[in-house]
Amino acid sequence: MSFLSATLDRVKPSPTIAMNTKAGEMKAAGHDVISLSAGEPDFDTPQNIKDAAVAAIAAGKTKYTAPDGIIELKQAVCDKFKRENGLDYQPGQVSIGTGGKQILYNALMATLNEGDEVVIPAPYWVSYPDMVLLAGGTPVIAEASLQTGFKLTAEQLEAAITPKTKWLIFNSPSNPTGAGYTWDELKSLTDVLLRHPHVWVMTDDMYEHLVFDDFEFCTPAQVEPALYDRTLTVNGVSKAYAMTGWRIGYAAGPQHLIAAMRKIQSQSTSNPCSISQWAAVEALNGPQGYIEDNKALFQRRRDLVVGMLNAAEGISCPTPEGAFYVYPSIAGCVGKTSPGGAAIKDDESFATALLEEAGVAVVFGAAFGLSPNFRISYATSDQELTDACTRIQEFCAGLS
Ligand SMILES: Cc1ncc(COP(=O)(O)O)c(C=O)c1O
């Protein structure tokens, strides 16, 4: 009998982390590798936020806190939801966790029983299906297509719902595609949910602030107030304020769900880091100009990458509404042979050959549930992006 838990057989390690590790090993061995696989902004946390953390240390705010967060941060979260999303929440409806990831995990652990289904639109963030499996549930993948800009349609959602469905996990703008749902597109999904009162929605709004052109972000409880009592609105400071290492995420929803999540957190991590919580108070309450500056920077990078990828033979790259990812199709490359002699059978063999032969690390689409594609994170310098896309163009031109 294995010493390890049978639960582990159900899940796989994160493929994005695996790709990063391989790229790191190649770099350490002296290879010239550009990594476009990491999902984090490439700039530093703003100074006012760092200062708030230093001040918290100096003031001795270095002890355990309430399991799901200090009241000051819960209040800042309520103010943020009111100010930016028009949503009314009280501090008792808010949970603070060690990153958005822990919040999502707590919510699934708090609600799923054996046999419960969770609808996950594909392409999806790699962790959703595995978190559902870890919590004992069954992921039901609803595949969106390139034709709809990787957005799920009402018909596809309707077809995925069964009497066993507990949650829809919704993510806009999306990791890995950058796709953002307009108000009308989201309304068509919330209309479906209105017809199925047993289904709740867990909305992952982590990339809310990274939207481009004149796209306007919206979230389910705002678009359909009748869903307020069965919506968990999840967000965090990681992406918007370049705070991935601080590990603070948050959510608001019905009080009984928040209480159940608190119970799980109190018996696992106790509480999110006290110092990071004070830093997050400053992130949410302090000056927000930083966000606008970053948007402009990311939009320029998106346009650079989309333009260069569409100029590569066999690649077709839609222009996403947000986040810092693009999800090009390599349908025109499949069936060919790489300059180094590798058969490009699918997106995994494409990504492997691209890394080994051209020194560019991307994540293959199968990891996100929709092929043949790959994900590029453009959260890196213009120079690196230009070099990487030039290498991709040369690699594709060399396919035969
Ligand atoms: C869609 C999505 N949700 C949640 C997370 C987790 O964010 P955090 O760093 O707050 O745990 C990520 C991070 O990559 C993400 O891409």
Image (spheres, rainbow, N blue to C red):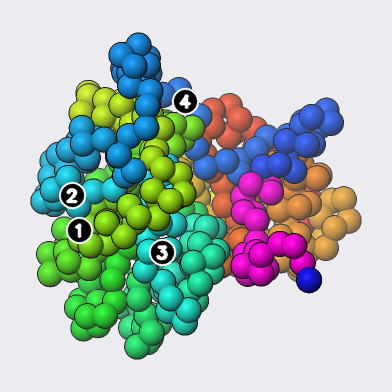
Residue 296 placement, left or right of 94 = right
Up the image or down, 354 lies above or below 135; here it is above
- Mark 1 or mark 4: which is in front? 1
Question: Residue 92, labelled with which disc?
Answer: 2
Q: Is residue 176 magenta?
A: no
Examine the rendering and report whether any part of residue 369 can be seen: yes
Answer left or right for 392 relative to 278.
right
Amino acid type at image mark 2: Gly
Q: Quadrant of the N terminus?
A: bottom right
Query: In whole angstroms, how far apart are the C-alphas of marks 4 and 3?
Result: 32 Å
Residue range of the region highlighted in magenta in the rendering: 2-19
Badge 1 vs badge 2, beta-carbon distance below 8 Å: yes
Which circle's residue, 1 or 2, is located before the other in the chain? 2
Q: Residue at x 38, y 40 (%)?
A: 271
**Which residue is label 4 attached to?**
43
The Cα–Cα distance between marks 1 and 4, rounded to whole angstroms, is: 36 Å
Which tag, 4 or 3, sits closer to the chain's start?
4
Image vertical order of residue 320 relative to residue 39, above or below: below
Q: Earlier in the sequence, mark 1 or mark 4?
A: 4
